């Protein structure tokens, strides 16, 4: 078992914006990298930092960055089953601390010496299969904000590795290497497509045929990007030869080549049914629905789903999605609501079956779909009739909901979610929450994170 200790970097602050398909700045290491426990059969649980760092992801990737990635791989990796490897790593850490260096980044002197070494020895044509597999696997949980950059990353890394192998191997050995690359790429591609499509299926209520159309669009988009990057290879390789002494090793640094391919761009007219922009917007809507479905009472769920649908209508009306995606989002809406209500109903049924003796029977009454639809329709009707004012629409929903939940509570006073807590919810709906002072522990945590 080998462990790789990476730099921690900054935790990205991703904001939800309606605009899509624009890179988020600030990512250099894998935003999904986390501390995980490795529990193999021959060792005790160990903390392991995930080092599937995406090279140049969502940010320029310089020659120094490329050299740093190699330095870290060579110096910060050790094998628990190899004492010499582990002792070498410990010695490095001790030396750095003795010299007052507490970062896992190479010092300026270390990096300069390492680059000089690379200029003498170059890099061979092998691909770091383990590293590439980890990079691709990290896209299984791609968020809408990451989607556009993730697709570019997958395609460019594949093309860069393919180019290196085709220049470095021949005959049967080349065939075997290409087969391995295809295996790794297809697994990463399937992971991204399946994971993102599942996000949409789970939250948008799309049909099986619609899900297949989304998968087909992903495949078409990636194929177009691969073809576009392959056409840019000659230009990029020519640019690398003009980097002076660094060209000796940069030509076989597939992470660097991939970053240059992404910089070169792939301006192609997609033939896919759904564009990257479409898929990004659909993912944002799905996340809104996912958050809304976490509520287990009809009123809050109705307001939150209405808010999500008003945002969706705004994006459709502003032309941020194609006609195909607009039709899918609208046609799947009813089923998505039913899915959310079903999930809430299952939760309430569980709570009723496990209620404490102090709660009377019926405390967690089944979900009231009529109440939900009444509040939801009040919002959406107001939105459609007032020219698209979301604030006015929400006020209409609150007004209706306050009356409707009070009536429901009088009809069935045992139901806890329609009682005092709901009265307080409506009463405080428009109040701005007071800022809570941070506790000493929270203060220390915030200071540490800063």
Image: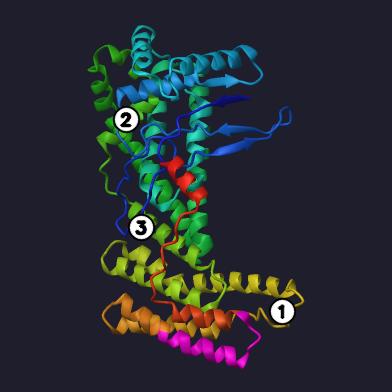
Residue 61 is marked as 2
- Dot 1 or dot 3: first in sequence order is 3
Q: Residue 438's x, y, as percent?
A: 46, 54
Residue at left offset 37%, top offset 39%: 27
Residue 314 is marked as none
**Residue mark closest to the camera, 3 vs 2:** 2
Q: Main secondary structure of the magenta part?
A: helix
Q: How many other residues sit within 10 Å of disc 1, few (<14), some (14-19) or many (≥20)?
A: few
Q: Residue 215's x, y, as percent?
A: 46, 52
Q: Read off the magenta span.
A: 399-416
Disc 1 and disc 3 in contact, CB within 8 angstroms = no
Q: Is mark 3 on a helix, strand or loop?
A: helix
> Is the C terminus in the top left, top right, bottom left or bottom right quadrant?
top left
Disc 3 and disc 2 in contact, CB within 8 angstroms = no
- Residue 84 lies in the magenta stretch: no
Residue 278 is marked as 3
Residue at left offset 63%, top offset 88%: 413
Q: In this figure, which residue is indicated by the disc labeled 1? A: 359
Vertically, is 261 above or below 196? above
């Amino acid at each position: 078992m080998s462990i790789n200790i990476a730099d921690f970097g900054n935790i990205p602050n991703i904001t939800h914006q309606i605009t899509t398909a624009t890179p988020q700045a600030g990512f250099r290491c894998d935003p999904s990298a986390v501390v995980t426990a490795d529990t193999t059969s021959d060792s005790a649980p160990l903390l392991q930092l995930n080092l599937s760092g995406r090279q140049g992801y969502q940010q320029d990737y310089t020659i120094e960055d490329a050299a740093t990635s190699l330095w870290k791989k060579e110096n910060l990796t050790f094998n628990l089953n190899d004492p010499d490897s582990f002792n070498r790593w410990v010695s490095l850490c001790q030396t750095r601390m003795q010299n007052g260096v507490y970062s896992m980044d190479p010092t300026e002197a270390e990096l300069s010496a390492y680059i000089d070494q690379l200029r003498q020895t170059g890099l061979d044509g092998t691909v770091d299969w383990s590293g590439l597999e980890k990079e691709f696997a990290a896209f299984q949980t791609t968020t809408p904000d990451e989607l556009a950059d993730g697709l570019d990353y997958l395609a460019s890394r594949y093309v860069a590795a393919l180019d290196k192998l085709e220049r470095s191997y021949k005959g049967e050995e080349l065939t075997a290497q290409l087969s391995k690359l295809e295996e790794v790429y297809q697994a990463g591609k399937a992971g991204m497509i399946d994971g993102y499509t599942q996000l949409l299926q789970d939250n948008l209520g799309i049909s099986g045929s619609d899900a297949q159309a989304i998968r087909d669009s992903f495949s078409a988009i990636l194929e177009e990007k691969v073809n576009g990057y392959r056409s840019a290879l000659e230009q990029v390789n020519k640019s690398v030869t003009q980097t002076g002494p660094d060209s000796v090793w940069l030509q076989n640094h597939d992470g660097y080549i991939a970053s240059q391919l992404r910089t070169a761009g792939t301006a192609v007219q997609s033939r896919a049914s759904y564009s990257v922009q479409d898929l990004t917007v659909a993912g944002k809507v799905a996340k809104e629905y996912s958050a809304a479905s976490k509520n287990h009472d009809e009123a809050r769920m109705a307001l939150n789903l209405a808010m999500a649908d008003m945002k969706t209508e705004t994006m459709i009306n502003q032309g941020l999605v194609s006609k195909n995606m607009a039709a899918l989002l609208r046609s799947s809406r009813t089923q998505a609501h039913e899915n959310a209500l079903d999930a809430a109903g299952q939760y309430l049924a569980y709570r009723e079956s496990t209620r404490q003796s102090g709660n009377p029977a019926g405390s967690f009454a089944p979900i009231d779909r009529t109440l939900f639809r009444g509040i939801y329709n009040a919002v959406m009707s107001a939105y459609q009739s007032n020219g698209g004012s979301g604030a006015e629409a929400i006020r209409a929903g609150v007004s209706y909901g306050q009356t409707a939940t009070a009536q429901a509570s009088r009809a069935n006073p045992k139901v806890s979610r329609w009682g005092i807590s709901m009265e307080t919810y409506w009463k405080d709906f428009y109040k701005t929450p007071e800022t809570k002072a941070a506790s000493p522990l929270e203060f220390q945590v915030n200071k540490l994170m800063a």
